[in-house]
Image (cartoon, helix red, strand yellow):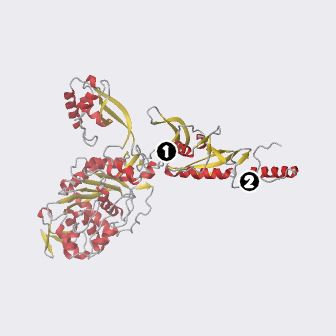
Amino acid sequence: MHLSYPPRRHRYSFRRPLAALAATVLAAGALAGCSGEDGPERSVDTFLAGWRTGDLQAVGFVDATGAKIPAADVAQQLKELSGELAATPPKLTRQGDPKITANTATAAIRVEWALPGDTRWAYDRQVRLSRGGDDQWQVIWEPRLVQENLTKGDRLGLRRDAGPRAAVLDGAGQPIVAPRPVVRVGIQPNQVPDVRGLVEKLDAAFRAIRPALVPAVDLADLPKRLAEADPGAFVEVVTLREEAYRQIKPRIYDLPGTKFQSEKLDLAPTREFARALLGSVDPAQADDLAAHPDRYAAGDLVGHGGLQGRYDDRLRGKPGLTVLIERPGEDGKLVPTGTEVFHHAPEPGQAVKTTLDVAVQNAADSALRAEKRRAALVAVRISDGAVLAAANGPGPAGENLAFTAQVPPGSTFKMVSALGLLDKGAVTPDATVDCPKTFTVEGRSFKNSDNFALGRVPFRTDFAKSCNTAFAALAPKLGGDGLAVAGRSLGLEAKWDVGVDAFSGKVSVNGSAAEQAAAAFGQGTTVVSPLAMAGATAAVARGRFEQPKLLLDPAPAAPAAAGPDLKPESVEAVRAMMREVVTAGTGSALKDVPGDPVHGKTGTAEYDNNPAHTHAWFVGWRGDVAFAVFVEQGGSSTASAVPISERFLRALPR
């Protein structure tokens, strides 16, 4: 009888042919279905273990023709075929027992790659084996054992596919950053007879554009770039928003060599629109790549600062991955073959919805536009506490002074002191309170701005004219913690959660008599932010504190609880006195502002030991909009903060 495999080494008697035949048939049946130590499964398991470690010396290999292949060669090919995936070998699992047919066997295996971003790529392959003359099972090596589309010389490569970045939305649910028309201004070198003259005319034109529309345009290297460019090339000079281009079009359109390309770019409504609060989106920087190599890759768009930075993970979504087959090109560099073997689609980002109002923010930005000192303006809707605008004037890029400044509030804090005094019954609006030129406490002399004195006048007049000495004299009636209690009733010092960094203030408490006198008119150790003062002003206008809110989605996890209703008689008196500030006091420049009546309080705050060094403030409201204006080193509030407030209110929609 002819057998299809070598007989097992058993001692059978040739005198018992039937017994020998039966034993041989039984052995054949056992080999086809068992998993003994000499079976192909051992070779498969050894191969899978060696694939992961790179050590295949315990495995025998042949090619499809049966020729032996050194294990080291197979290990090298495995590494090369794995390409960009080689650093993280796959998880390999044998699926059941091999199937044996004569001298060949086939084993099913599961290949699972762990790709970047917690992405898994799994598929099944077949390992073919051949039994050699020494009765040992050898793996038939072929590149497609790694992946069915691979051939010799191929490499697995990774392509990272960024998902579409989501938008930051305004309070109406519209993207703040959206496609907006721009014009690329360029030069065609072979059409410029006088480069120097052209540069001079362009420079003069660009300088005429309002700074809010475009940063300074540096033309120093333009002659060199024109000289090095192809004669008929479009050499870009600057990209302008359409409104900026229209400002200077008559001056540059007909200049020799100028060319113009119109398109749309994703931009905020204006260049300055809530810049510090929103942050920016830029290509990944070296610091980003070094700090988060698993998160970012070169070319990724990354949020920096503000909402874009804080919610970058949410906005950018999750990148997708494509595994493709590459092959070395003529220059040795790997190039895609066009075959993609795995694709994990990117997940789009999720939008961040804010309470910002485009018209109010534009009014705030416009009001600060001419200010050369660091400044901030925050606007809050009184009815629900929504932050409508957060504008910052000149200062370090990304510094949100509107939310994070920690500065003395000056006389705007008389709003808080007056509320505390009225709550305690220590004074009434019409009670006579002396306003001397100076007032001394514990050897410390307090004075009024420009050394004025009002004499014995109603308390409401002291408030409207901002008499420091009157409030210093009333400070003992507040007690050690009276000012802090009044401030907390307006939300100051509370733990706020607005979705970005914000300072809710720190109020002087239990200080010396001199400290209490200073704190009564916003000096001493009390410090606040413009957002904190806008929130406190809205609380006075509303009649209770409600934390300013900036984010609607995702909503902050732990916003401060709303406060109790303020005492009606106290808060109504403060409102009346804040109206008198505008009609007959230090804010009288605002009395002819159109629309609903304006209420407010001016403030000048010393920030060091030099009385001439002062910040300027104004807080107030008109209609449903409360606001706070702060100007660092602004001097007199009537010369800086009040004019900004007027510009804001006149630009504000009614």
Q: CA distance from mark 1 to mark 2?
A: 39 Å
Q: Is residue 229 positioned above or below 590 on the image?
A: above
Nearest to the observer: residue 222 or residue 448: 222
State how many labels appear.
2
Nearest to the observer: residue 165 or residue 602: 165
Q: Is residue 298 positioned above or below 619 on the image?
A: above
| Mark 1 Cα-neighbour bin, 10 Å: few <14, some 14–19, many ≥20 | some
Secondary structure beneath disc 2?
Answer: loop
How far from the left and from the top, in percent, is residue 298?
40, 44
How far from the left and from the top, in percent, is residue 66?
65, 39
Nearest to the observer: residue 340 or residue 608: 340
| Amino acid at circle 1 | Glu
Question: If the image is split into quadrants, where does the N terminus sit?
Answer: top right
| Amino acid at circle 2 | Cys
Mark drawn on residue 304: none
Viewer can see residue 193? yes
Question: Residue at point 29% right, 37% down?
Answer: 244
- Choose top left, top right, bottom left or bottom right for residue 459: bottom left
Viewer can see residue 592? no
Among numbered discs 1 and 2, the one appearing first in the sequence: 2
Secondary structure beneath disc 1?
Answer: helix
* Horizontal side, residue 417 vs residue 491: left or right: left
How far from the left and from the top, in percent, is residue 300?
41, 45
Residue that numbered label 2 is attached to? 34
How far from the left and from the top, in percent, is residue 389?
34, 52
* Horizontal side, residue 450 vs residue 482: left or right: left
Front position among marks 1 and 2: 2
- Choose top left, top right, bottom left or bottom right for residue 429: bottom left
Nearest to the observer: residue 484 or residue 140: 140
**Mark 1 touching mark 2, by CB under 8 A?**
no
Q: Is residue 559 positioned above or below 309 on the image?
A: below
Residue that numbered label 1 is attached to? 84
